Image: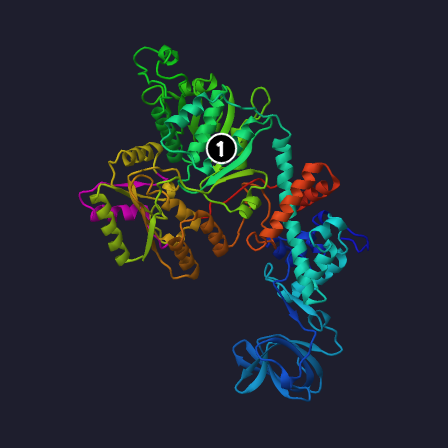
């Protein structure tokens, strides 16, 4: 750290160890590092939580009660006495000529005040037994110069690694004085354009403002900088990884997509058509697509994806869909198989024991171009043109020679030995459950050096500003409207306990008696001594006892792949009346006959997750119901359940979840290595986020290697270690 008057960059300060700040010794350095503060730059970003204006003094006779204030006067009396073992009380009185006020400190080390000494006191004045009293005030003996706490706007810092706020204040004073001025990445015109103060002013005024009104502009500039770093990194990544790479231009012949549309029983919604148009335009471009398709539960994302995949197949290429679980991958495969069969686009399956494979390539009289699909998971390989499961090596051979047009699967699709002849479109469903490397593996370069298109899917509705913060390097398509015929799911709540059990059992009996099916979801697999919540295993046993004569099954993630597949197949065929499970059924499960979902300990789930679970029912001709069984004893739990009862709008619930829980960690280590936003809040500061995003896009598009871009990226590298990857948590 230098005491030079010349300006230095924030990137430079990010390389300066924090123990070069005066007052930071070895012990405090360890405490700061435990709180994530290793450099001077990170220390400067630890900003005050509030401020005390101690410039104006009051007379004791007119001092306001209940407010932070400052008075000065003469010590009339002072006494120190022990009140209990190891505890002391210090009392005194101060007079300023207009009145006398009592002061008291409990168990505080400080030097005795001398009677007749002139002092300044700062704190909150209260009425105690009819007299004015100031408890635990800061005290300055006139002439001793405790300047940081008096006659100024005093910053109050949040706890930092166990270091007392007063000590943080003294260290910060040294850090700010020795760090300023700080080089600005924005020129004067840009600051004027966005109504921003310069960076030196921002750091000075956020820590030691001369006026309270200076804090707002300082905070605004530092928030803009946080957003600008993230957004610029995203735009640079998009430029480097997509905008300047060679893709696979897919225009399609229209043969398969037109046939699919003809057989589809409903008209696509406007949202589906708009999303499909954006995807088709990206696929036809010479650069690889990098797009996120998001939409409400049941909004019809799957149909859009199937049409995009068929366009790739029409052009003589292949598609792949990767899902995080076998249950979801199987659901995608079966749903597509059904759609192809309904449209007369599926090949005729053959018995592999009755005559070899020649018939696979024989002319099919009813289909101009059959579409061959396959399912690849850890436990099985299945295709729609051969009956039963097939040998994995045979399935891989059909992927490699192009026999299989579309592959569905889990991470089995990216394991060693899996090669596709001409992959042109890679789709990743519930992509937030995969790491960046896994997504990159799926869309790795083809033999000719071109990059396949990448379409990410999520059923978790993401509001625009949140999508910008999480997916800044992605284009986003959102389907916000629902297909006609989908009825709202009636939602109710009951408290956890015996009464809740009785309501659950009654509803389950009613549903089973009507020939419908139901889900019961629990947060745990097994009972836990540490977590007081329902387990799927215990609830399964209880429900089975209560519903004699009906079929009750259990499903959770610890079961084998074959067991899970068998249970889901029985649920699909209607052999199971009630399925008790964990959140393994959260996404992608389509049981049209399911009309009731019961969520036990609903207070333990995030709003987006509750909304996803609720969307598992009411997917057929029968209306759906959702029962939330919850302990609403905390304010947060009550707010969450109330939001579920008042709205079935996933975008509203996503924003509500963000408000209730806070933005938390936007970029996890597995996804990016970037730190959380320190000052910015994507709900409160949405306008600044959009402005920073627009400016980042502008400067990168103008010149990827411009000095301003390079300086911002250098800050990202120094402060975060790597450029942030697009990432999102599941909200649970």
Q: Residue furthest left?
A: 549
- Name the spot of residue 351 as percent of width and height, x first: 30, 16
Magenta-drawn stretch contains 557: yes
Q: Which residues are magenta?
A: 530-558
Q: Is residue 581 left or right of residue 39?
A: left
Mark 1 falls on what kind of element?
A: helix
- Identify the residue at image location x=33%, y=43%: 617
Pick the front one: 307 or 412: 307
| x, y percent for residue 392 | 40, 22
| Res 322 visible | no
Q: Is residue 500 above or below residue 79?
A: above
On screen, residue 404 versus residue 622, left or right, reads: right
The one nearer the camera, 537 or 228, is 228
- Report the residue at 35% width, 16% height from top: 366
Quarter of image, res 631: bottom left
Number of numbered discs: 1
Quick check: can you spot residue 426?
A: yes
In this view, 709 is above or below 562? below
Q: Image point 47% across, 16% down: which residue? A: 401
Q: Could you say which is closer to the camera, residue 709 or residue 462? A: 462
The location of residue 94, given as percent across then percent down, is 65, 85
* Closer to us: 622 or 434: 622
* Residue 729: in magenta span: no
* Residue 341: image location, x then y, percent: 34, 24
Above or below, 369 against 145 in this view is: above
Q: Quadrant of residue 263?
A: top left
The residue singled out by tag 1 in the image is 276
Q: Badge 1, how many Cα within 10 Å: few under 14, some, many 20+? A: many
Q: Residue at x 60, y 28 (%)?
A: 287
């Amino acid at each position: 750290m230098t005491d030079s008057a010349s300006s230095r960059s924030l990137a430079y300060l990010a390389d300066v160890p924090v123990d070069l700040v005066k007052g930071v010794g070895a012990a405090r350095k360890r405490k700061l590092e435990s709180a994530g503060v290793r450099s001077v730059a990170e220390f400067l970003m630890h900003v005050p939580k509030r401020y005390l204006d101690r410039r104006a003094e009051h007379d004791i006779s007119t001092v306001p009660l209940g407010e932070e204030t400052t008075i000065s006067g003469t010590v009339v009396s002072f006494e120190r006495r022990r009140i209990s073992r190891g505890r002391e009380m210090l009392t005194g009185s101060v007079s300023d000529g207009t009145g006398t006020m009592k002061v008291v400190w409990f168990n505080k080390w400080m030097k005795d005040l001398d009677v007749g000494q002139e002092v300044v006191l700062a704190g909150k004045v209260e009425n105690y037994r009819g007299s004015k009293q100031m408890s635990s005030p800061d005290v300055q003996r006139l002439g001793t110069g405790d300047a940081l706490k008096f006659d100024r706007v005093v910053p109050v810092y949040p706890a930092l690694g166990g270091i007392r706020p007063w000590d943080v204040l003294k260290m910060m004073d040294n850090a700010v004085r020795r760090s300023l001025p700080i080089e600005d990445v924005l020129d004067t015109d840009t600051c004027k354009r966005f109504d921003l103060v310069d960076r030196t002013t921002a750091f000075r005024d956020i820590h030691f403002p001369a006026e309270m009104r200076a804090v707002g502009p300082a905070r605004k500039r530092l928030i803009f900088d946080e957003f600008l770093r993230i957004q610029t990194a995203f735009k640079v990544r998009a430029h480097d990884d997509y905008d300047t790479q060679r893709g696979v231009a897919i225009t399609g012949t229209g043969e398969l997509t037109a046939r699919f549309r003809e057989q589809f029983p409903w008209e696509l919604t406007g949202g589906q058509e708009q999303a499909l148009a954006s995807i088709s335009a990206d696929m036809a471009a010479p650069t690889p697509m990098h797009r996120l398709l998001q939409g409400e539960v049941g909004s019809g994302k799957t149909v859009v994806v199937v049409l995009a995949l068929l366009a790739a197949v029409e052009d003589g290429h292949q598609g792949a869909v990767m899902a995080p679980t076998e249950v979801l991958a199987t659901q995608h495969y079966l749903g597509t198989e059904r759609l192809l069969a309904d449209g007369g686009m599926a090949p005729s399956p053959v018995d592999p024991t009755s005559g070899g494979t020649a018939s696979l390539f024989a002319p099919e009289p009813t289909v101009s171009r059959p579409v061959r699909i396959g399912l690849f998971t850890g436990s099985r390989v299945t295709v729609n043109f051969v009956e039963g499961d097939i040998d994995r090596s045979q399935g891989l051979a059909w992927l490699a020679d192009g026999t299989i047009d579309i592959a569905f699967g889990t991470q089995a699709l990216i394991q060693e030995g899996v090669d596709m002849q001409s992959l042109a479109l890679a789709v990743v469903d519930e992509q937030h459950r995969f790491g960046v490397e896994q997504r990159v593996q799926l869309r790795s370069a083809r033999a000719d050096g071109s990059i396949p298109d990448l379409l990410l899917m999520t059923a978790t509705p993401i509001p625009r500003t949140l999508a910008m913060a999480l997916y800044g390097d992605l284009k986003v398509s959102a389907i916000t409207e629902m297909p006609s015929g989908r009825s709202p799911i009636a939602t109710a709540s009951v408290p956890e306990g015996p009464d809740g059990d009785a309501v659950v059992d009654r509803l389950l009996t009613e549903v089973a008696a009507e020939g419908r099916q139901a889900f019961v979801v629990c947060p745990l697999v097994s009972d836990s001594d540490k977590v007081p919540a329902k387990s799927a295993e215990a609830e399964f046993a209880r429900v089975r006892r209560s519903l004699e004569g009906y079929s009750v099954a259990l499903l959770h993630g610890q079961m084998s792949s074959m067991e899970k597949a068998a249970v889901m197949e029985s649920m699909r065929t209607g052999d199971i009346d009630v399925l008790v499970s964990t959140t393994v059924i959260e996404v992608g499960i389509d049981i049209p006959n399911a009309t009731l979902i019961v969520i036990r300990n609903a207070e333990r789930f995030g709003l987006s997750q509750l909304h996803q679970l609720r969307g598992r029912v009411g997917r057929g001709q029968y209306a759906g119901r959702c029962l939330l069984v919850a302990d609403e004893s905390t304010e947060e739990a009550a707010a969450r359940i109330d939001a579920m009862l008042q709205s079935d709008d996933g975008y509203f619930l996503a924003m509500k979840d963000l408000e209730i829980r806070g933005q938390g960690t936007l970029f996890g280590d597995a996804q990016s290595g970037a730190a959380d936003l320190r000052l910015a809040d994507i709900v409160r500061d949405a306008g600044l986020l959009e402005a920073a995003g627009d400016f980042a896009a502008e400067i990168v598009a103008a010149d990827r290697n411009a000095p301003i871009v390079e300086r911002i990226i250098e800050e990202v590298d120094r402060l975060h270690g790597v450029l942030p990857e697009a990432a999102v948590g599941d909200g649970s």
